[in-house]
């Protein structure tokens, strides 16, 4: 296993982590994480992970594509942070990673010993619970470094308010 969690030790502050992506259920995870963070007095980190861009040797196309991906991720994080501020007035920390989703997620959590909970939302479509939930449950959840809260994607704001 990785580093021990220190979220509740002196000099540390617990953090909830929510993933910012393009899935329809993302706002459910953000809403729950924001409400729960305020209720329990912890911080909130929003993480956006973009896939690695294939390096194109000619004319710096790979660098341009990477810059565009980072720009898109930053814009998504800005929108998500504004959403959280609008819900609960909390100023979240924002982070961006480039690479394979599951690998970068685990690496990010391992690097921040104050992360105490990962909040995800399950999709409601016929395709299943969503790519990240599917990847974690099917592959790494048994050895995951923190607990994972999976919010059902069909829950409305009032439902989440009652739970968070």
Image (cartoon, grey):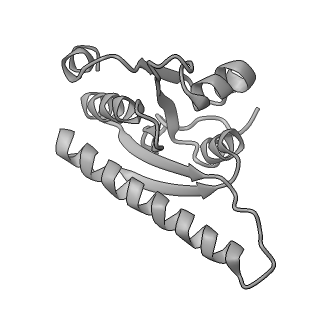
Quarter of the view holding residue 69: bottom right
- For the C terminus, the image quarter is top left
Q: Residue at x 70, y 72 (%)?
A: 62
Q: Residue at x 52, y 39 (%)?
A: 115
- Position of 161 with respect to 153 (left or right) is left
Answer yes or no: is residue 142 visible. no
Given residues 13 and 95, the one toward you in this image is 95
- For the N terminus, the image quarter is top right
Residue placed furthest toward the bottom: 59
- Position of 28 with respect to 133 (left or right) is left
Quarter of the view holding residue 135: top right
Q: Position of residue 3 (x, y in %)?
A: 69, 39
Given residues 9 and 130, the one toward you in this image is 130
Answer yes or no: is residue 28 visible. yes
Q: Residue at x 41, y 30 (%)?
A: 25
Quarter of the view holding residue 66: bottom right
Q: Position of residue 30 (x, y in %)?
A: 35, 36
Q: Position of residue 8 (x, y in %)?
A: 46, 34
Q: How many tags in the picture?
A: 0
Q: Position of residue 99 (x, y in %)?
A: 69, 53
Is residue 95 depicted above or below 119 in this figure? Answer: below
Is residue 71 depicted above or below 83 in this figure? Answer: below
Is residue 136 depicted above or below 7 in this figure? Answer: above
- Position of 53 with respect to 46 (left or right) is right
Residue placed furthest toward the right: 57
Given residues 1 and 108, the one toward you in this image is 108
């Amino acid at each position: 296993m990785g580093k021990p969690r220190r979220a509740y030790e002196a000099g540390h502050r617990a953090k909830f982590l929510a993933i910012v992506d393009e899935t329809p259920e993302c706002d459910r995870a953000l809403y729950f994480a924001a409400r729960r963070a305020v209720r329990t007095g912890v911080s909130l980190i929003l993480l956006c992970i973009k896939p690695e861009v294939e390096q194109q040797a000619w004319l710096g196309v790979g660098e341009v594509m990477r810059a565009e991906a980072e720009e898109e991720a930053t814009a998504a994080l800005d929108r998500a942070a504004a959403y959280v501020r609008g819900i609960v007035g909390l100023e979240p920390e924002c982070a961006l990673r480039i690479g394979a989703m599951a690998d970068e997620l685990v690496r990010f959590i391992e690097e921040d010993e104050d992360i105490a909970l990962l909040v995800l939302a399950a999709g409601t479509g016929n395709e299943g619970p969503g790519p990240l939930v599917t990847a974690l449950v099917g592959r790494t959840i048994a050895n995951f470094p923190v607990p994972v809260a999976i919010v059902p994607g069909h829950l409305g704001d009032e439902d989440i308010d009652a739970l968070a």
